Amino acid sequence: MPLRNALLALALIVLAAVLVAVGDAWAPDRPVADLAARWAPPPSEFVTIQGMQVHLRDEGPRDDPLPLLLLHGTSASLHTWNGWTRELSPERRVVRVDLPGFGLTGPFPHDDYSIERYIEFIAALLDSLGLQRVVVAGNSFGGQVAWESAVEMPARVAALVLVDAVGYPFTPESVPLAFQLARYPALRPLIERLLPRRVVRASLHDVYGDPHRVDEALVDRYYELALREGNRHALGLRFAHVMPTDARARRIATITQPTLILWGGRDRLIPLASGEGFARDIAGSRLVVFEALGHVPHEEAPVDTVIVVKDFLSGLN
């Protein structure tokens, strides 16, 4: 009887611990209306594109003949470009957008997260804004959308800035915990309802070259926007298309637009070898490595990284 009582007590302790852990991590979807007040103040706007209310910011002089379109990576948002926009918008028109499946834009209506669907979205976005020709900058997955759009729409993409971009098959040194969990279909019903804040913090530490630069305000932003209704479901579907193939990578050598390649020397997700691949395969391109930065160098050190971008833009027609 004492043993039985002890085992029962232990079981109750374990159950209580699990309930506390789940309670701490329980995070149901939030309606976009509940998030917009904090994350979409002016100059944010919502524009109807392909049946979605797309969150974007369009800043800087409207007479700029060659606007800049900024595309974020997986699980990020247009806010990742805050630093670059502050530096560039006094002289350049800068458009940034929450890509479908992320930020406040939320999921595609038909749950198709193939790269082809994103290229169609970029074309529709440019049409909606009346932009005929732009420079496209993209980080990580947004970098893939950027260069693939350049291949498919060479008349509309005048130049490229690729920031730790997806392009070649790669083996990561480290994968953020949130991404690891989203890769498993069996876990999707769980991760669509649970999101421990510490998982978001750990994932940000993983992609920054210096984790000390990750503050609670940054964790707050990534955490809250991940909870936008439909985003976690979309993330699981997006990972069905996440790894580039050799066949797609061969398209990179067909890029003829002027291209600047920026890479974080401490990127543990996409190795520098991918950046070197872009530099090798895109004729006339330039690779700049920031040795102390990680996978999101534009966000981690915007003032330092945008200097190179300004120089690149000044040389374009």
Image: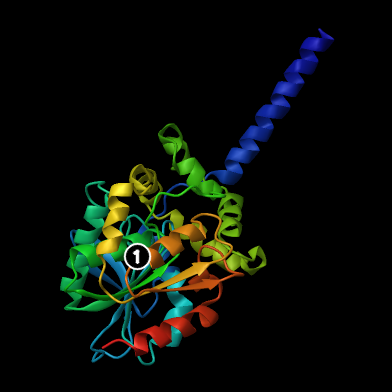
User: Where's the C terminus, which quadrant?
Assistant: bottom left
User: Where's the N terminus, which quadrant?
Assistant: top right
Q: Which amino acid type is shown beneath numbered disc 1?
A: Asp
**Residue 24: x percent and y percent?**
60, 45
Left of 295 or right of it: where is 122? left
Left of 263 or right of it: where is 202? right
Q: What element does badge 1 sit on?
A: loop
Q: Nearer the viewer, residue 192 or 36?
A: 192
Residue 15 image-quadrant placement = top right
Left of 71 or right of it: where is 53? left
Residue 291 image-quadrant placement = bottom right
Q: Nearer the viewer, residue 279 or 179?
A: 279
Residue 163 image-quadrant placement = bottom left
Residue sitting at 58 percent across and 68 percent down? 293
Instruction: Check the image and name the residue furthest to the right.
Output: 2
Q: Nearer the viewer, residue 159 or 298?
A: 159
**Residue 28: x percent and y percent?**
45, 47
Instruction: Check the image and name the residue furthest to the top.
Output: 1
**Residue 16: x percent and y percent?**
67, 32
Q: Which residue is mark 1?
A: 98
**Residue 285: x percent and y percent?**
37, 74
Render colour scheme: rainbow
Residue sitting at 29 percent across and 52 percent down? 248
Relative to 251, does residue 128 appear above or below in the rendering? below
Relative to 201, does residue 217 appear above or below in the rendering? below
Crowdedness of circle 1 by 10 Å Cα count: few (<14), some, many (20+)? Answer: many
